[in-house]
Image (cartoon, rainbow, N blue to C red):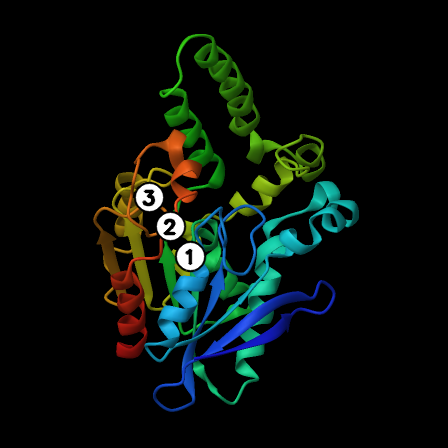
Amino acid sequence: MISEKIVVGTEYPLDGLLTIPEIGKAPYPAVVLVQGSGSTDMDEKIYKIRPFKDIAEGLAKLGVASIRYNKRSFTYGKQMMKELGKSLTVKEEVIEDAVFAADLLRQDDRIDSNRIFIIGHSLGGCLAPRIDVDGGDFAGLIILAGSPRRLEVIMKEQQDAMLETLKGPLKWIGKKQIAKMSAKFDNIYSLTDEEAKAIPFAGGTTMYYLKEMGQKTVAEYLADSTKPILIMHPEKDVQVSLERDFGMYKEILTNRENVTFKVYEGLNHAFMSTIYGSINKVLKEFKIEQHVNETVISDIADWIKNL
């Protein structure tokens, strides 16, 4: 494979890598890799794991090109907060750069411009249908450990699960914190934009970040879409739910013949072997060097090639 340094975007130029296969013959199908929540680099590195590096290099060996890049909040976090502050949304943090990356692929003669896909992981998976509509215009969507539910609903569920692992005073403190957070979430969509921008959320953002993202739900974007979709979910994921999130995808898309659903036994949120399987040990698990399951990567490549 060939890995070339590229730059995504102009106002906020982001370092990235374009990975081209050395097997088969150009033009190749390609994917844009979109990270989950948080400020992560192009490999989606979390402690000792690098899921996007694994996926990009694995796909290249199977004849699929890819583009990955540092997240805007990773490179320009402080600058973004200074310039946008309370008005920051996923549009500036994620969506614009994914569209730029897709356009960059279309300008490369080695890439089949009619076979460019998006792979969204976690929050990136939630946003994939919106990115497609907002300019990505992909040939299909690949959603890894995503959710059709609103982010605040997932966050509340994760906090409740974490609470169950606590005891004594820590549990009491946790209950108070969750109750305070939930009170902010309960009326978020009845707030005006200015009211939402006045309420802190996380990392310097405000409730406007959630309000803007959740005003049109993932389910609504999916209902409007006719694109082929591959929904992939790890069975042992403790961050999004197999029953509620994967199950809801199946409900929404149940009558769509061009949607494929796959569940991977024994894998965690990063599509690696689960070790602890507990919400309170997620980060500890990511401190152990592992790699994305090879079957997951080959299933992605097969799905792309068979469309």
Q: Residue at x 61, y 62 (%)?
A: 96
Q: Give me the C-alpha separation between circle 2 and circle 3.
A: 16 Å
Image spot of residue 188 (x, y percent): 57, 32
Amino acid type, callout 1: Pro
Horizontal side of 234 relative to 283 (left or right) equals left
Q: Which residue is mark 3?
A: 245
Image spot of residue 140 (x, y percent): 38, 70
Horizontal side of 77 relative to 286 (left or right) equals right
Image spot of residue 76 (x, y percent): 70, 53
Amino acid type, callout 2: Ala
Query: Which one is in front, 31 or 61?
Result: 61
Task: State the image quarter where residue 98 is shown.
Answer: bottom right
Q: Are marks 3 and 1 in contact (CB under 8 Å)?
A: no
Query: Which one is in front, 244 or 222?
Result: 244
Q: Are marks 1 and 2 in contact (CB under 8 Å)?
A: yes
> Tag 1 or tag 3, which sits nearer the N-term?
1
Query: Which one is in front, 91 or 304?
Result: 304
